[in-house]
Amino acid sequence: MKTALRLNRRSRRIFFSRVTWQRRLWFIGGAVVVGLASVAFALAANAANAIFHRALVAGAWIPFVVAPAGFALARWCTVAWVQGSQGSGIPQAIAALALGEAQRRRLLSLRVAFGKMGLTVLGLVSGASIGREGPSVQVGASIMYALSRSRAFPLEGMQRGLILAGGAAGVAAAFNAPLAGIVFAIEEMARSFEQRTISIVVTAVIIAGVVSLALQGNYVYFGRSGATLALPAGALAIAACGVVGGLMGGLFSRTLLMIGSGRARWLARPQREHPVLVAAACGLAIAIVGWLCDGHTFGTGYEETRALLDGTVDSATFGIGKLAATLISYLSGIPGGIFAPSLAVGAGFGHNLAAFFPNQPADALLLLGMASYFAGVVQAPLTAFVIVLEMTQNGELALPLMAATLIAHAVSRTVCPRPLYKALAKGFKADH
């Protein structure tokens, strides 16, 4: 009885403590800022994507000028001013969880956050096949890390928890998918949690999600889908999507890791000695791929994916063309993520597979292709399943989506044994 009373008094002291409330208010403020930053980033990225596509109407020659120049400028800024901002941003956030204070500052800072957003927008206005969702993780983690360095959060464990929460909140606000943010944090950014850390992540995700919802409304990323797939009649289609998505996603990841590790010597030396020229060459290659694919491979791929789902576009080359454009954009070394482009690639492959299953709904196969390829790339099947489910609000496809992502994950592991983000994070740890 006495022990219970002492614990009760201690709990009341902690609850009403000025320090405790100071930390809570700082944390809530930080989560709100992450939400605001994600919304601003989304609006800027959408505007940049729209500007490029409007310019494309003026002439097919536009990308051959804009893309090399924009890629070169973005890469030069990355090397000269914002080192550590290249690529997705998710590996940097994962690496920062394991690094010391001095090393973390090079990967997570407000300077990196602003640079990441600005240079990703520059890449989109130049036609790069990149997304803002992965960079939102590094932006969110950077904002919360800056918060953690205040006197209110002096402990190492608190810093790691806030970095994790910031990354998860970035995903949630970027996709307007709070459950996906939580699952992503658990499945991808960390493998073990204390109960206290889970509550921090959930709270940050909810706050950032509320901010996004208040400013952008209750939108669904790819629109509500009523696609269905009957079982067991659709089992073969589900298996095909899982195998193809896992195989292609695994090959994509394996290629990125091979080049990122320096094993591709024909590219490693030019990237190291002439990064701006390599970026310009990648910009030219992006223009060529876009020209061959009738302009469908530029940008995030969001509009093209919506058009495939609506049945207003029929492109047999979109999937493979978008994969090539995304790979080239990543190799250029400019900031930009692979979340949205990967979903677009998967939709393209799902569209191709629909031709082999004429008795099955084509829109259902597109969604299965999206989830399967994404699961194959990141090897995080639960995240892939939840993201596509939340982005389309289609509970009817829950079981087929789950089955396809699990198949894709198993197939991808045979092609690329190392998870992409975890392996890339090791490179950032070694560099710092």
Image (spheres, helix red, strand yellow):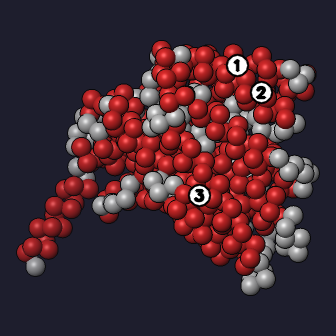
Instruction: Specify few, some or many for label 3: CA neighbours under 10 Å numbering under 14, 14-19, or 20 or more.
Output: many
Toward the front, the furthest residue is 266
The residue pinned by badge 3 equals: 376
284 left or right, relative to 327: right
**Which type of secondary structure does the marked residue at label 3 adopt?**
helix
**At label 2, which amino acid type do we have?**
Ala
Query: Which percent across, then down, holds residue 292?
Result: 84, 35
User: Dot 1: what SS?
Assistant: helix
Q: Which numbered dot is residue 287?
A: 2
Amino acid, disc 3: Gly
Across and down, in percent, residue 240 comes to 72, 69
Which residue does the image show at 85% across and 51% down from the upper left? Answer: 316
Q: Position of residue 182 (x, y in %)?
A: 48, 58
Classify 405 as above or below 317: below
Give the Cα separation between the discs numbered 3 and 1: 30 Å
Vertical order, 202 against 213 (above or below): below
| Residue at screen point 16% across, 61% down | 10
Residues under numbered marks 2 and 1 in contact, where contact means CB atoms less than 8 Å apart = yes
Q: Quadrant of residue 296?
A: top right
- The N terminus is located in which quarter? bottom left
- Which residue position is annotated with label 1? 68
User: Which of the two labelled residues, at mark 3 and mark 1, occupies the earlier sequence position?
Assistant: 1
Characterize the local packing of mark 2: few (<14), some (14-19) or many (20 or more) Cα atoms within 10 angstroms.
Answer: many
Position above or below: 269 against 191: above
Say whether disc 2 or disc 1 marks the residue closer to the N-terminus.
1
How many residues crowd around disc 1 within 10 Å: few (fewer than 14), some, or many (20 or more)?
Answer: many
Dot 2: element: helix
Of pointers 2 and 3, the one earlier in the residue sequence: 2
Nearest the eye: 10 or 146: 146
Label 2 to label 3: alpha-carbon separation: 27 Å
Residue in the picture at 50% in, 30% down: 265
